[in-house]
Image (cartoon, rainbow, N blue to C red):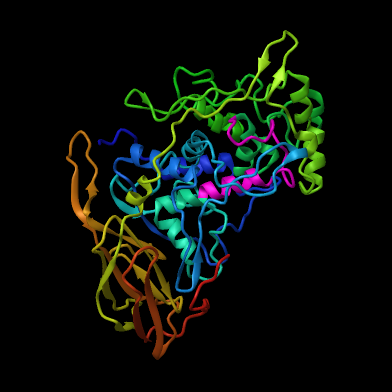
Amino acid sequence: MGHPIARISAVVAVLAALLSWGWHLSGGTPEVEACGAAGPFDFDTYEAEDYLAAYTQAIELSAAGKGVTFAYNVGGEPVDVRYQGLLKGPRAARTTQLNTNLAIPPSIMKSIIWIEASWANASSAVPYGGVGPVIRSFDCGYGLGQITSGMGNSTGNASAKQAVIGTHFLFNLAEGARILADKWNSAPKFRPIAGDGDPAMLEDWYYAIWSYNGFAALNHPASDTEHELDWEEYGLNPLRDPLRGEVYHCSDPQAPGYDTFFYGSYTYPEKVYGCMRYPPLRNGARMWNAQTFNMPDLKLEQIANAFKPEHYIKCEDAGFANGCPDMDFPTTLTLEDGKNVEPHKDTTLPVDAALAAGFLGDPFLEYNGPSSMALTVFADGTATKGTVSVANTGTFIGPFRIRTSAPWIVVRHPGQTGRTLDGSIAIGFETDVVTQAPNSTRPRVAQEGYVSELEITLDPLLTPGGTGNVGKVWLEPLLGGGGVFEIDIVASSSAGTPQHRVVAPNVASED
C-alpha cells in the first residue's frame, strides 16, 4: 500500500511523551533513571509497509494472548512475554486465578498504541517497509508499545528479552499486552475497580488504562495533588479545562473540542477512550471500529464521590496499598428518570490465531566475516575496523542481540558513527524491504530482504593503552536458528591510557 501517514517527527514524539509523562509513573513521581546507569540501548527494527493491516492484526493477536504463545531461552536467559490472563469480578468477589481465556478489548490496545507511538515502531527516518532505529522516547520507552518497564540498562549489554522487545514488533506488542494485563490485575490490591471488574466491558478498564500511563494525579479527571486548595474551591483538576468535553477528539475535525482543546488538555484515560470513540482517519476511513461507551459522569453522585480528591490523596498517602476502595465506581446504574446505564463490549471480531505464524516467520541467521580481529587505535584518535554481515536465509524478521565483553569495543553500521548497536535484524529475501519511500517526486525503491552490515572498531577514549588487550563480540539469534557467532578482539592503542574506564560484565542480566 502507499504511505498515507506522515512519520511522526522526533520532536513531536518527545513532546507527546513529555505531555503524557510515560506509563512508568507511580504516584506522580517520574522514573528519572528509566534508561539505567549505562544509558539507552540502541536497536534496529522493522517498520511494516502495510502497517495498517499488519499492526491491526498484531495488536488483536496480542490483546487476545495469541501473538507470542511460547517461552524460550537465549544463551541461558529466559524470554517470556506470554499473556498471563486476567482476573475478574468486583472487589468482594474477585477471582484469584488468572484466566487466559479472558482477553483485553483490542480497541483499547489500538488506542493506547496510537497515543503512545502513533502506530510507529521505528523512528521517523525509517520508511514504511524499511529497517532502522526503533522509536525511543526520552525516558527509554521502545517501539509501538513504548515499553519502558524492564528496559533499563545497568550492565552495558541488553538481556535477550530486552533485545527482542526492542527489535521485533510482535514481541513488543506482546509485552505491552502483558503489562496492560498486569495493570488490570493489580486491582483490588493496589488499584480501584470500575464497574463489576468485567474485562469484557470497555468502561471497566478505566483504572487499568490510567495505570498504563502511571496512576498519577496528573491523570485524575477532577484533582491534582499539587493544588489542594484549588480542588476544594473548584472540585476539578485545575490543569484541565472543565469545558474540554468527555474525551480527546483524537484529531478528528468532526469531533467536539477539535481546534479548541489539544492533546495536553486531556487526561490519559480521556486520550485513550477518545481514540476509541473517534479512531484516526486514514484515506477517509477509520483505522478501527469506533466504539460506544460511557465515561465516568461526575454529575452523578455515585460516580462523583469516587473521584473526590481526598479519596485519591488518602490512597496515594498509603502507597496505594489498600487498593483505593473509596474510588470504586459503578458502570451499571439506574438514573432518577428510570433510564438504565449499561457498560459496553468491544465490537471487534475475533482474530485468527493462525496469523501469528506469519509475523514470527522462520528465521535462520548466517554470518560472513572473520572470527578474530586485531584492531588498533592510533595516536591521532582514529581506529582500524573490521566488518561482519548477518543474513537471514529463513523468512521474515531475524532479530539478533549484539554483546561485547568490554565497553571499548564498538559495534555499529558502517558510516553511522553516532550509534553503538545492542541489537539488529536481518530480513528474509522473500520480503521486500523499502530503502526509499515514495512521494510526489520520487518512486518507491525496495530490495529483496535486508542483510545487516556491521562494523567492529574501538572507542579511542576507552581503549586501554598498550598492546594485547583482548575482548569478544557475540552475535546471537533471538528467534529461530543460526547459532552464536563469536569474534575474538585483540586491541592495541598508541593514543595513551584513557582518563577513565567503564566496566561492564560479559553477560547481561535481567533488570
Q: Residue furthest top?
A: 337
Tell me, yes or no, if residue 54 can be seen here.
Answer: yes
Whether 21 is drawn above or below 332: the answer is below
Image quadrant in which the N terminus is located: top left
**Picture layout, residue 378 above or below residue 69:** below
Front position in the image: 497 or 100: 100
Q: Quadrant of residue 43?
A: bottom left
- Tell whether 301 sits left or right of 354: right
- Assess whether residue 208 is covered by the magenta stretch: no
Lateral position of residue 390 relative to residue 501, left or right: left
Question: In this orientation, which residue lies closer to the viewer: 367 or 41?
Answer: 367
Q: Quadrant of residue 395?
A: bottom left
Q: Position of residue 437 (x, y in %)?
A: 24, 43
Report whether residue 213 is seen: no
- Percent coordinates x, y for residue 140 in the rendering: 52, 54
Tell whether 312 sits left or right of 112: right
- Above or below: residue 249 compared with residue 313: above
Q: Which residues are magenta?
A: 176-202
> Residue at position x 62%, y 55% from top?
32
**Could you say which is closer to the camera, residue 365 or residue 492?**
365
Specify the quadrant that holds the C terminus. Answer: bottom right
Magenta stretch prevailing secondary structure: loop
The residue depicted at 46 percent of the width and 58 percent of the height is: 70
Q: Residue at x 52, y 46 (%)?
A: 177
Q: Is residue 183 magenta?
A: yes
